[in-house]
Image: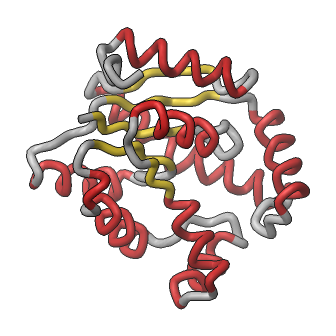
């Protein structure tokens, strides 16, 4: 059973790497961004609410996010492990996740921190916005999201570092290079080696 968190600034390649690691480790990638975007596309009540926050580059409120993620982690395919992408993003969400896992006698195995240069992440996200037509990826919103990340999410790295869980990986380079770096770092910790 492997339980991972992938953390890093917007544009660091978390979604791409989450999908690759999910396949290699045979565990589901649980992405709050995907959950929200699916609801936005579907025009659900949650989607409309989430879009109003996303378009301003702000986080969807913890109460909504927590409920969605915990519901997803209770699905049968997450019984053998999971990879979180985009959650938790605040210390309150860390506490919620800790409580949820503790009730199940579980804990995270590692937190993979992808690092990336700010200007490079802005460029990546602007290219993605153009390619995918994503309304939430204007330069102003991207830079605001990076500021929000620095203020609210980066401190989580300290929380997890104090627990000895953080594995820092350079997120720049080709997709294969970054995946290989993550896999090597996990194997050095004895995590997922059999599945990899």
Q: Quadrant of residue 171?
A: top right
Along the line of sight, which residue is nearer the eye, 37 or 154?
Answer: 37
User: Percent x, y for residue 143?
Assistant: 77, 51
User: Percent x, y for residue 25?
Assistant: 40, 32
- Total labels: the figure holds 0
Q: Quadrant of residue 53?
A: bottom right
Along the line of sight, which residue is nearer the eye, 150 or 49?
Answer: 49
Residue at image x 74%, y 21%? Answer: 173
User: Percent x, y for residue 145?
Assistant: 68, 55
Q: Quadrant of residue 164?
A: top left
Residue at image x 56%, y 35%? Answer: 20
Q: Quadrant of the C terminus?
A: top left
Residue at image x 57%, y 84%? Answer: 49
Q: Quadrant of the N terminus?
A: top left
Residue situated furthest top in the rendering: 188
* Rendered view: 117 above or below 177: below
**Left or right of 50 on screen, residue 74:** left
User: Percent x, y for residue 169?
Assistant: 55, 21
Along the line of sight, which residue is nearer the eye, 36 or 116?
Answer: 36
């Amino acid at each position: 059973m492997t339980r991972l968190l992938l953390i890093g600034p917007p544009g660091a390649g978390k979604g791409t790497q989450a999908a690759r690691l999910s396949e290699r480790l045979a565990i589901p990638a649980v992405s709050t961004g995907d959950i929200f975007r699916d609801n936005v596309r579907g025009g659900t009540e949650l989607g409309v609410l989430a879009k109003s926050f996303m378009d301003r580059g702000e986080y969807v409120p913890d109460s909504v996010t927590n409920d969605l993620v915990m519901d997803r982690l209770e699905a049968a395919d997450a019984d053998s492990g999971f990879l979180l992408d985009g959650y938790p993003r605040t210390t309150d969400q860390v506490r919620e996740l800790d409580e949820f896992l503790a009730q199940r006698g579980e804990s995270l195995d590692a937190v993979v921190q992808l690092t990336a240069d700010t200007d490079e992440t802005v460029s990546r996200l602007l290219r993605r916005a153009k390619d995918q037509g994503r309304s939430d990826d204007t330069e102003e919103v991207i830079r605001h999201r990076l500021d929000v990340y620095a203020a609210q999410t980066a401190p989580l790295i300290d929380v997890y570092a104090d627990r000895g869980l953080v594995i820092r990986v350079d997120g720049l380079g080709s997709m294969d290079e970054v995946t290989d770096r993550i896999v090597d770092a996990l194997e050095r910790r004895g995590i997922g080696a059999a599945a990899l």
